[in-house]
Amino acid sequence: MSKRDLVLLLEDILEAAQKIKRYSSGLNYEAFIDDDKTMDAVVRNFEIIGEAAKSIK
């Protein structure tokens, strides 16, 4: 893996984590689980983090 590829993967992870924080900020647990769109967006960004992390070698 090139250094550039690693940097891109880490940027993907950071961006997804920032989105998770932004989407869930200010929500308590009940509000979060009642909001399907937010929950789906957060889950998708966790998937992105997992896919990127799996690619780091």
Image (cartoon, helix red, strand yellow):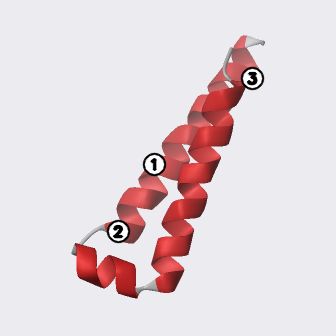
User: CA separation, marks 2 and 3?
Assistant: 29 Å
Q: Secondary structure at mark 1?
A: helix
Picture layout, residue 29 above or below residue 14: below
Give the CA separation, mark 3 to mark 1.
18 Å
Q: Quadrant of residue 50?
A: top right
Q: Is residue 27 left or right of residue 38?
A: left
The residue pinned by badge 2 equals 24
Q: Earlier in the sequence, mark 2 or mark 3?
A: 3
What is the distance, in whole Å, between disc 1 and disc 2 at their CAs? 11 Å
Residue under the image location 53 percent in, 82 percent down = 37
Graded by Cα atoms within 10 Å as few (under 14), some (14 to 19) or many (20 or more), the crowding at tag 3 reads few
- Crowdedness near tag 1: few (<14), some (14–19) or many (≥20) residues, C-alpha within 10 Å: some
Q: Are marks 1 and 2 in contact (CB under 8 Å)?
A: no
Q: Quadrant of the N terminus?
A: top right
Q: Amino acid at mark 2?
A: Ser
- Quick one: 40 or 9, which is closer to the camera? 40
- Tell how many labels: 3
| Residue 57: image location, x then y, percent | 68, 14
Viewer can see residue 31: yes
36 is higher (above) or lower (below) than 1: below
Proximity of marks 3 and 1: CB atoms separated by less than 8 Å? no
Q: Please, what secondary structure does the residue beneath circle 2 have?
A: helix
Q: Amino acid at mark 3?
A: Asp
Considering every residue shown, the one lying at the far right of the view is: 1
Figure check: 21 above or below 26: above
Q: Is residue 2 left or right of residue 28?
A: right
Task: Name the disc covering residue 5, or none.
Answer: 3
Q: Position of residue 24 (x, y in %)?
A: 35, 68
Q: Label 1: which residue?
A: 17
